[in-house]
Image (tube, rainbow, N blue to C red):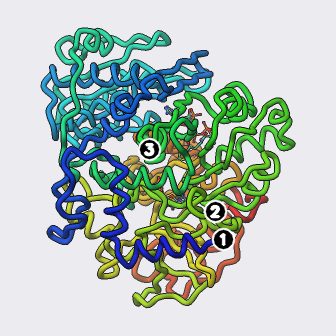
Amino acid sequence: MGEIYDKVYKESIDNPEKFWAEASTKVHWYNKWDRVLDVVDGHYRWFVGGTMNTCYNAVDLHIENGHGDDIAIIYDSPVTNTKKTYTYNELRDRVAKTAGMLSSHGVVKGNRVIIYMPMIPEAAIAMLACARIGAIHSVVFGGFAAHELATRIDDARPKVVMSASCGVEVSKVINYKPLLDEAIEQSTYKPVKCFIHQREEAVADLVEGRDFDWAEEEAKSELAACVPVDAIDPLYILYTSGTTGKPKGVIRSNGGHSVAMKWSMDNIYNARAGDVFWAASDVGWVVGHSYIVYAPLMNGCSTIIYEGKPVRTPDAGAFWRVCEEYKVNVLFSAPTAFRAIRKEDPEAEFLKQYDLSSVKNIFMAGERCDTATYEWTKSVTGKEVIDHWWQTETGWAIAANPTGLDPMTVHAGSPTKPMPGFNLQALDADGKQCEPGVLGNLVLKLPLPPSCLMGIWEDEARYQNSYLKFYEGYYLTGDSGYIDKDGYVWVMGRMDGVINVAGHRLSTGEMEEIAGTHPDVAEAAVIGVDDELKGESPMGFVVLKSGANRDHAEVVAELVQLIRKQIGPVAAFKIATVVQRLPKTRSGKILRGTMRSIADGKEWNMPSTIEDESVLPEMTEAINALGYPKPKNKDI
Ligand code: COA
Ligand code: AMP
């Protein structure tokens, strides 16, 4: 156990070009690449000179290999009482017609297309249609509000937007179209056309000349063929949270992405053609891009698009029901989903009604899988639970347990070992390698393997400053952690203002910026605190402007609404308080780490750099007055 992994990992680090050249043979190329790896202006580019098409690899190739009647997509929507399947043939027709629709409306290779959709097959169809004609898609998560959508429209400058009239959150119909209208109103750049998938739960009004009924336009379109693109042409831009209010547009290329997706399906997930693969996430996140849409389809699996929650749709047996009904082989979700199930059904009574024998393993990502969630999930399902660690920027797991290559012993709380090509190290502040077991900054020695970000969309400085400037020759993951003497990786948390709320990546810096726009707020600090269900939750502290004699509860209620309006409900910003002052260092830096330790009920020491020691007792009192429960599970 572990010997095969050791050999494969070493090969990938010693000779990345040979390793990935071999892996690339699993992908269909129109023209094989000339060079496996190239360095252009300090950027690493994989499979230069190769031409391929991601949609062809995900859809058409299977039809040509005689698998057109296999199930490609299973759509299961407890919130609308709908179940539907698409064979690869049916999927190809919808994708090719949608691509034809985009082409006939002037979308060409390199144009950006924003996709703002709920969890319905049309979301995947839109993504694949863009890939088919070489347009660059940028999916915006449905839980984001108009302002976030507007920011992304301004940054990506999409020629068209593809959206739906509404989404359904448990039993609430969320009208997407008014949010889209408001976003276009707010944005400086205006997309030329919008295609709206009308759903019967809420039919949207269309703006004459700008908006088109997607179904009508698709019906009259020709089937479009796959357009060969360069391996290094962008497949998509996916915005993710950083330390500031402006999201970062992570660019992913076509060729490297496909090669890494294929490698990961075979070796990490052990998922083969004909298997049913279920990533219970959302197409708006990277997990959804990689493992709801692209990778399962590329490997000829059936992928599940689930429009529901782990609980309340209708109960805590939802995941088990889907696993039994579709004979799911690989289940993948975030620990928060299993915590939600455990909270509602601690004895897993629902599970007793279902047969999970098809499930090989349960994969978790999005946040660290705490020991309690690991133990509970493993004991009630009888399945091995595999935590794996990755980021929007990498597109696939930096560290995982390669169940298809060489399954290794699981250590609860560790995502196991680095995956091929990820030369992971823990460095101290001076750039020296930490001893085994010693906490440091988790960094990746360049080059990053295929599928990792090519850069930040039209912001080279941000790319350099966010990831590369800290340690020469290394990519900074932003996570802290250590590697133990056996080579196991332990990820302990973010070093920056990024938090993970219910597996959703959010920026506390952005929340601070928004709180700062409230007319009565002089200063704001937002920290992530431990949350029994969601892993982390934002907690806000604001200092009012002098003379702002406002009722504190009213200001807090206004801030909660303001952040909900600007970022969206997914921010889940619900707890805040007004304080007289914030604890700061003598150089004016807010001591967020100490605030967090106080809020989490952890031990803390008076920082030697603090400007005024009397602020912290005040802060402790303010936090205690919030009555926010400290998680019983200290491992979260
Ligand atoms: N469109 C519109 N609104 C959305 C949305 C979407 N796609 N997704 C979430 N929201 C809304 C929710 O309705 C909720 O609104 P509310 O404040 O009006 O109740 C709010 O955003 C917060 O949502 P969430 O953080 O998801 O909390 P929840 O209580 O609704 O559900 C979980 C909690 C744990 C059940 C849920 O977060 C979950 O299933 N998480 C799985 C994690 C996941 O998919 N992670 C992706 C990475 S793998
Ligand atoms: P995202 O870009 O939304 O995928 O979020 C990436 C961040 O989520 C990482 O940088 C980590 O902080 C956190 N994360 C994701 N998966 C894990 C994991 N398995 N263990 C620990 N942290 C994780």
Give me the residue at 52% from left, 82% from top: 610
* Side of 421 relative to 306 (left or right): left
- Looking at the rendered image, the disc whose residue lies closer to the viewer, 1 or 3, is 1
* Side of 547 relative to 41 (left or right): right
- Depth check: 250 or 609 in front? 250
Q: Secondary structure at mark 2?
A: loop
* Separation of marks 1 and 3 at Cα, in angstroms: 26 Å
Percent of width and height locating residue 545? 42, 56
Give yes or no for contact between labels 2 and 3 (Cβ–Cβ under 8 Å): no
Check disc 2 and report the residue beneath it.
407
Residue 371 drawn above or below residue 354: below
Return the disc, 2 or 3, that comes first in the chain's sequence: 3
Assess disc 2: are there few (<14), some (14-19) or many (≥20) residues with their C-alpha within 10 Å of its C-alpha.
some
- Depth check: 515 or 354 in front? 354
Q: Quadrant of residue 359?
A: top right
- Depth check: 173 or 331 in front? 331
Kind of residue at disc 2 = Pro
Give yes or no for contact between labels 1 and 2 (Cβ–Cβ under 8 Å): yes
Q: Secondary structure at mark 3?
A: helix
Q: Quadrant of residue 408?
A: bottom right
Percent of width and height locating residue 608? 54, 88
| Residue 516 in view (yes/no) | no
